[in-house]
Structure formats: C-alpha cells, structure tokens
Amino acid sequence: MNELRVPDIRACLEGAIPANMATCAADGTPNVAFLSQVYYVDEEHVALSFQFFNKTRQNILANPQAAVLLLHPQTAAYYRLHLRYLRTETSGPLFEGMKAQLAGIASHSGMQAVFKLLGADVYRVERIEAVPGEPLPPALPRGGMLAAVRRCSEQLARCNSLDEALNAVLSTLNHCMGVLHAMVLMVDPAAQRLYTVASSGYATSGIGSEVQLGQGVIGVAARERTPVRITHMTNAATYTQAVRSSFEAGEGTMDAATDIPYPGLAQPRSQLAVPILAAGRLLGVVFVESPDDMRFGYEDEDMLVAMAGQLGATVELVQVTGDAADAPPAAAEPEPTASGEPLQLRRFAGTDSVFVGDNYLIKGVAGAILWKLLRDHAGQGRCDFSNRELRLDPSIRLPDVTDNLEARLVLLRRRLAEQCPAIRIEKTGRGRFRLHVERPVVLTEIS
Amino acid sequence: MSRPRIPPELLAMMARGVSVIVASRDATLRPSMMRAMGSSVESEGRRITVFVSRAQARQLLQDLAAGAPIAAVFSEPATHHCVQVKASRVAMRDATSGDESLLARYLASMEREVQRVGFPPHLTRAMLACRVSDLVAIEFEPEQAFDQTPGPRAGKPLVEAAP
C-alpha cells in the first residue's frame, strides 16, 4: 500500500471529532491530551493549537516526539500520526487562520471563555499509520469541484472586463457550487479598507460597503493574506462581520451619512474568506457564507483559493489592457437632450463624497472620478473618456499606478445603477467608456 | 507520595463507560497510543481495566509489556469532563468471554455518550468494533490522577485531602 500523506487524511482534520495526543516527559511518564485543532499546513506538516501551559507543553519542549490519534468523522477509521515538534508561531497567516478556526470550534463546544490560541505548534509528520479496524464504507466522493473550477477558469479566460470577471466568479459559486451568499471586495491600500464591488444572495447588494483590514473574517483574511474558514459561528463574535457603526467610524456625521450597510447575513453559521492576490500584492477578498453549520470544508477552501488566484490574474490583466486603451470610438450619436427634473448633485471636496439630492452616492477616488466626468460633460459637452486620462488627472488623486482603477469604475458604475440610474457609465472598448446623462444636472461644490 | 483520590462525581462518570484513550512509550520515549474498546473501574477507582485491540495497539502493548508506564484519559464528550490516571506498571491478560457483558455495557454507554454530541450509534459501533479474542485487558492501580477538564483547574492532581 502507498504511504499515507497528510492530504489523504484531511477529512479527519475538520475538527468534527476531537483528536488525542500522546507525549512523554523527560522522566519517561506518558501523557494524553485532547486537541481542539489539528490544522493542515502542507503535505508534510500539521499545526496543533497551543492553548495552555500544561503537561503537553512541558513534554514537547523536553521531548519533541508525539503521537496523535485521529478518527475519520464519516467512516470511523483510525489514523495514528507520528510527529516531531519543530516550532511555535505566535503571529502571521498560520496563527491567524488557526485562531479564527479555533474561535468557531470554541463557540460550537461552549468553550469560548477557555479556548484562546497562544501559539500554532508546527510539527513534521514523520509517519501516518492506518490503524486496522472495521470502518464504515466511505461516502461517495464529492463530485463537481474540479469541474466548477474548470468552468470558472474558462469563463475568466474569456473576460475582458472586471465586470465580467466578477460575474464569472459569482455565477460559478451560485450555479456550480450551490453557494447562495457571496461577495467580492477590493482593497483600498491607502485607506486600509476593503470595499464591496460585487455580491449575490443578499437583500441589498451592499456595493460600496466597507470592511477595515483586520476586521472580522474578511478583514483578517486580507490582512494576513490567508484563507480563513469558520465552520461553527454560533458565538464567534470576534469574527462576526459586524456593520461598521458610525460610532466606530468616528469623525461625526459625514461618515455616518456615507456608510453603506454591510450586506452580510445577520446570523451566519459558516464563513470562508480567501484573499485575491496577484504578483504578490493583495487585491481583495472573495467571501462566502451560509446560515448552516459546517457548510464549507477544506475542498471548498481549495476551490475558492484556486478561483481567487485566477480572478487575481484576470484583474491584473484587464487593468493592463485597460490602461493601453483602444483608439477613440467613432463620434457618438448625438445624445438625446437631457430632460426632466434637474438632478441636484453636491460634492464635499474634503472627502470627494457625492450626494444626489439628500442621498449619498459615492466617495473617495470613485467620487472624484464621477465629479470630473460630470464637470467635463457640463463644461465641454464631452461624453467619451479613457482610463488613461483618469490616471493622469491630478484632480482624481489616484494613489499610484498600481491602484485598481477598473475596480473603482465598477464600483461607480454599480452605485450609479442602484442609486442614480439617470446617469450611466457604459464601456465602449478597452480602456474606454461613455457617460450617459439623461436628466439635467446641477453641480454644487461644498468645500 | 499521596494517594490519588478521584471525587465521586468524576468516578461515577469513569465507571459509567466514557471515552478512554491509553498511552505508553518505548525505550526512546516515543509515545504509543490507542483508544480503548472498553473499560471498567472498581474499588473506588483503585483498580482500573482498559481493553485494547492487539491489531490496533501493537506498539502500545509491546511498550507496556516491556515495563513502560501507562497513562489513560477518561472523558465525557458532551461536557468535556476529563480525568487522567497514570501508573508505573500494569498487568495484562487476554480478554475472555467473561468480559463480554462488560464490553457490551461499555458499548451501549458510549453509543449514548457519543450521540449526545451529535454522532449516530452506527458510527460509535464502527469506532468500537472488535472481537473479544483480539482484545487484551490491561489492569492497573492508578498512582496519580489529574483533573483534566479544560479550564483553570486543568492538570490539577486529584489527591487525598490532607488530614
């Protein structure tokens, strides 16, 4: 029989049934402990949660040999792992991933007051023994995961805009994976925040709502650039993606007025957030959640990481092609004259916040972009624009060339569609778009 | 050395038939371990027997036969109540048909205990599937006992109150 490796026993690491660990003191006295968590690190390593300064701790520091007994949660097959303690990590992606998962486990077992992660103990797996027994037949392997990744990959390869790429990811999750609640957020590195650019399954889209780096499952996944998966959320309050209250935001009334409510489930039971990375940079987060316990397993995590990788590459590519714009399109058909009640738009210069009447529309870089477009439209009668000129325009204050201009435009386009459909932005080619203004507009600057 | 004294409520839990994990170690201090397929606790915890499968616990039995000490943890899955007992030596014998009723009671108790945390009885039966002819009874007198329920008292020795 082939030698077992850690990937072969990942189902046993899902925390459904607590594992046990045996260690031995320097004086030869054995000790048995319960493990809250056996965490998959890679093909040859696992990490165990270090929560207490106890006998196990003393033993592994004196004698790094350990054994762990695992039980398969569906078949009841036993596996014995022979381990060697290597090191303890107290910060970073592994630590944060374990800490979030442990909060879920603690919540599920009513131990949230007791379970606190002090460190991630990393062990090399020297051998995995399949213990003889009379296990139940294994469940049918879960099908369709690889096919779903393939479907997403095919769709992404055909995309030539960020809009299409976001739709490809959400539709794969919805239709191929049965994920009902999902969102994609992009990072604003200067503000240390993520903003929602796409979502599905929620009562309100939440496009434009913000999450701070480090806040909740989404914020931790972004800050640590690591997947975060919680399978029992009952009381994992620290990780609940609470609405960013205006009190928390501080800064008085303006922030409260420009807060778009976070769309997520009020009582999620399972959550999984995966960073979107490209060329070593954080671009955003793909997030899925469910009202059911244990909805997302390690296979879902693997799949989402694969999809997020593809999405990251696509985001970078459409950004590059967007900056190298097509030639300007043929002169547009003359715009039908704007008619109807004038729209009153106000901009607060300090934050680039734009309001339509009394309703908040957009702020920040996307707000500055909208204002430039409307001013050029009003002053020069222009309606065709390019990404490149936005990038070069000092009034927009794009942080730098790596800023995701496409994501800002998606945000703006989607906010307009929801909040002010009389103004539309239509893509007319690579790096080019057209502004449609169907009602007269009155622009007021407030400094 | 003070003699271990396990409080009555924890003793009752252990005697009822709860989860038991047994460990020892070899001459190089490498740990060996397996789940017990049955247990019995007599004489107010002064005599404990745990049953393990020869096929499943080859190294553990070899280590104990070589005279290595034993550690065994009794735990109630639904409450996390947990007691660890240790002894420097054990006596071993083959299980016999005389042990069958005890093993059946243990299995029935474990089916209930594990069901309380949401797993169906057929999983417990697979987890504890064994033939009596394959079992070894390991008997020992605990020399140390520890309350291992997670929390502030975890690891506290359970001993006779000072006179």
Image: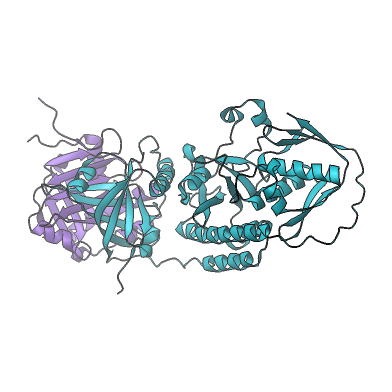
Chain colours: A cyan, B purple
Quadrant of image for the C terminus of chain B: top left
- Residue A12 is left or right of residue B97, and the answer is right
At horizontal 35% and vertical 36% (from top left) the residue drawn is A114
The residue lying toward the viewer, choosing from A37 and A314, is A314
At horizontal 83% and vertical 49% (from top left) the residue drawn is A382
- Residue B63 is left or right of residue A125, and the answer is left
Q: Quadrant of residue A415?
A: top right
The residue lying toward the viewer, choosing from A96 and A17, is A96
Considering every residue shown, the one lying at the far bottom of the view is A1
Q: Quadrant of residue B156?
A: top left
The residue lying toward the viewer, choosing from A293 and A253, is A253
| Residue B161 in view of the camera | yes
Question: Where is residue A212 shown, x and y percent of the image?
Answer: 55, 39
- Residue A275 is left or right of residue B122, and the answer is right
Question: Where is residue A272 shown, x and y percent of the image?
Answer: 51, 50
Q: Quadrant of residue A102?
A: top left
Depicted A31 relative to depicted A161: above or below? above
